[in-house]
Image (cartoon, helix red, strand yellow):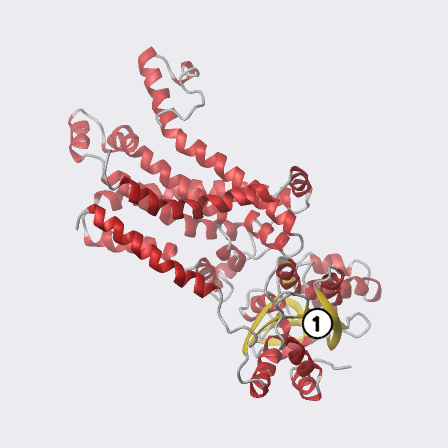
């Protein structure tokens, strides 16, 4: 699009772009390869990275599994209840993570709303890996639900009606028409939610505590390392940023890859097993 | 409004914001500001001292930052604009002196460790020997002075109480906190069965019960204060240290439960 506003737009965009990108570049420049090697050997590193990987994958699965039906309803419903629920779902984004942590303690802690009941069942949530996952789900889910709801909102209702008249069940119409059409938005939501879960710090520290191997995720390990050795902290931070970057790129490329796999399958009349050449790397559809 | 003028006004807005952001970054008049970095356990004592200080230095704009001593040390090493540092152990102060960042460090107070439990004492901890009962024990990280002292005390207890005591205690460890106040807060919230904190932290909370740690295993925590070496160090730094070491300052520290000698 050629527009006379392009230059001022670039001028306005440049500071924010600088602010977003330059610190990440500075982070990369701050660590030498030997610092990185040292950080990777640091006793904090491996347990924290594994714990972060484990907990964020579980959180992401829970968010997608439970968030998709909610997002579908929010995206399709025009009721006032849906609008109210939408606002409530947004709340954990607005509230500081530390407050989310305190709120979780007030709910699931020993003296929380469900505390006595959980204690009766012999269940303890604070200070466990379960608490880490719960904190991540609470802070990450809103990002997924909002993005997925808006993607579902964009699906043409007529197409769903056509699918139904062609003999699809409601379930079939959802999985074969609505979900594929909304997929790019849903995947962006999943990527955002996963990124937010990976970066989660405040709610985890308050609700789950900080114990290596059990509740000390990468952001907490970075925080602890920062208190003793800044170089290790910087290198840990860089590793986390790189892992996040790779996974975000993969997630962003996934819908295009999926589409190409699907197209290849249709073109060749074969299954997804015939589609290696079409589904190679390269971020198709950019 | 066309998109072009809208963009232009947005640019004007950001341009107008810029000086505000820059000004917000450097507050306080040169020469009258004083920035003190102090161990968390000193929070209330230093608050009271700053009221005294303001009486003799009405023009001073004083700011006190409290955190785990290891956090403050790292921030100072990274160039934080602190004028005075008060550490809860010698190690973090000595590291700054060795790096040429602090000078003339002096011991100004002592403290010791106690166990704190919630008022309803769910794990039934009535003596130091009961500590293995804590299924949810909270300590400081190994870097924060209170966490380091606690591990020293536990190590001493292993030979004095019974072999295997430390493992039994650490088996209940559920969280390592970055300063003594965070450790205490887990007990105040009733989430932890016990935490090892300073005697002064136990005394300044009415939501915890104190269980003594016997003198044979207890430690003597040493607090050091020193002026930081920076080109634009506040001329008030020495005045603050003098106040802390004065009879008046020592009385305040004693009132908050610190030992003076």
Hey, which quadrant is residue B260 in on the image?
bottom right
**A96 to A186, vertically: above or below:** below
Closer to the camera, A244 or A129?
A: A244
Hey, which quadrant is residue B33 in on the image?
bottom right
Closer to the camera, B242 or A251?
A: B242
Asked whether, in this view, residue A89 is left or right of residue B250, the answer is left
Residue B240 image offset from top left, x and y in percent: 64, 79
Q: Residue at x 32, y 18 (%)?
A: A263
Residue A174 image offset from top left, x and y in percent: 26, 33
- Few, some or many residues within 10 Å of mark 1 (<14, 14–19, 20+): many
Visible in this render: residue B204?
no
Hey, which quadrant is residue B65 in on the image?
bottom right
Visible in this render: residue A56?
yes
Q: Residue at x 41, y 39 (%)?
A: A191
Residue A139 image offset from top left, x and y in percent: 42, 52
Circle 1 SS class: strand
**B251 to A90, vertically: above or below:** below
Q: Residue at x 63, y 42 (%)?
A: A46
């Amino acid at each position: 699009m050629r527009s006379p506003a392009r230059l001022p737009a670039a001028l306005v965009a440049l500071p924010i772009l600088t602010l977003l990108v330059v610190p990440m570049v500075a982070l990369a420049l701050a660590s030498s390869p030997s610092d990185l090697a040292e950080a990777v050997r640091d006793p904090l590193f491996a347990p924290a990275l594994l714990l972060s990987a484990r907990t964020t994958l579980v959180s992401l699965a829970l968010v997608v599994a439970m968030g998709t039906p909610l997002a579908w309803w929010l995206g399709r419903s025009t009721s006032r209840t849906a609008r109210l629920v939408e606002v409530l779902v947004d709340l954990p984004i607005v509230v500081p993570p530390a407050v989310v942590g305190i709120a979780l303690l007030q709910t699931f802690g020993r003296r929380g709303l469900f505390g006595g009941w959980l204690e009766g069942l012999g269940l303890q949530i604070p200070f466990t890996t379960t608490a880490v996952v719960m904190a991540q789900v609470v802070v990450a889910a809103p990002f997924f639900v909002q993005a997925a709801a808006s993607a579902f909102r964009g699906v043409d209702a007529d197409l769903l009606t056509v699918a139904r008249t062609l003999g699809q069940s409601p379930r079939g119409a959802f999985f074969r028409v609505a979900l594929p059409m909304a997929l790019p938005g849903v995947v962006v939501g999943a990527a955002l939610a996963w990124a937010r879960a990976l970066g989660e710090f405040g709610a985890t520290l308050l609700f789950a505590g900080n114990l290596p191997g059990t509740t000390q995720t990468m952001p907490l390990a970075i925080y602890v390392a920062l208190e003793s050795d800044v170089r290790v902290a910087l290198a840990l931070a860089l590793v986390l940023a790189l892992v996040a970057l790779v996974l975000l790129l993969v997630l962003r490329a996934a819908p295009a890859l999926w589409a190409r796999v699907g197209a290849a399958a249709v073109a060749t009349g074969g299954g997804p097993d015939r589609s290696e050449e079409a589904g190679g790397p390269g971020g198709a559809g950019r | 409004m066309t998109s072009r003028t809208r963009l232009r006004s947005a640019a004007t807005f950001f341009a107008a914001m810029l000086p505000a952001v820059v000004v917000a970054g450097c507050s306080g008049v040169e020469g009258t500001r004083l920035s003190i970095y102090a161990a968390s356990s000193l929070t209330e004592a230093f608050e009271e001292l700053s009221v005294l200080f303001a009486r003799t230095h009405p023009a001073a704009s004083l700011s006190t930052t409290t955190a785990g001593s290891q956090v403050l040390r790292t921030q100072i090493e990274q160039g934080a604009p602190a004028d005075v540092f008060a550490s809860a152990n010698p190690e973090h102060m000595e590291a700054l002196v060795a790096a040429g960042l602090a000078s003339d460090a002096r011991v100004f107070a002592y403290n010791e460790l106690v166990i704190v439990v919630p008022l309803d004492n769910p794990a039934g901890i009535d003596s130091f020997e009961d500590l293995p009962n804590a299924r949810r024990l909270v300590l400081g990280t190994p870097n924060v002075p209170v966490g380091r002292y606690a591990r020293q005390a536990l190590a001493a207890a292993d030979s004095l109480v019974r072999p295997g005591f430390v493992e039994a205690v650490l088996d209940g460890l559920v969280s390592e906190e970055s300063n003594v106040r965070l450790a205490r807060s887990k007990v105040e919230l009733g989430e932890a069965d016990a935490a090892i904190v300073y005697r002064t932290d136990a005394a300044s909370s009415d939501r915890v019960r104190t269980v003594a740690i016997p003198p044979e295993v207890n430690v003597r925590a040493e607090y050091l204060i020193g002026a930081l070496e920076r080109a634009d160090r506040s001329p008030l730094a020495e005045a603050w240290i003098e106040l802390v070491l004065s009879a008046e300052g020592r009385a305040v520290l004693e009132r908050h439960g610190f030992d003076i000698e």
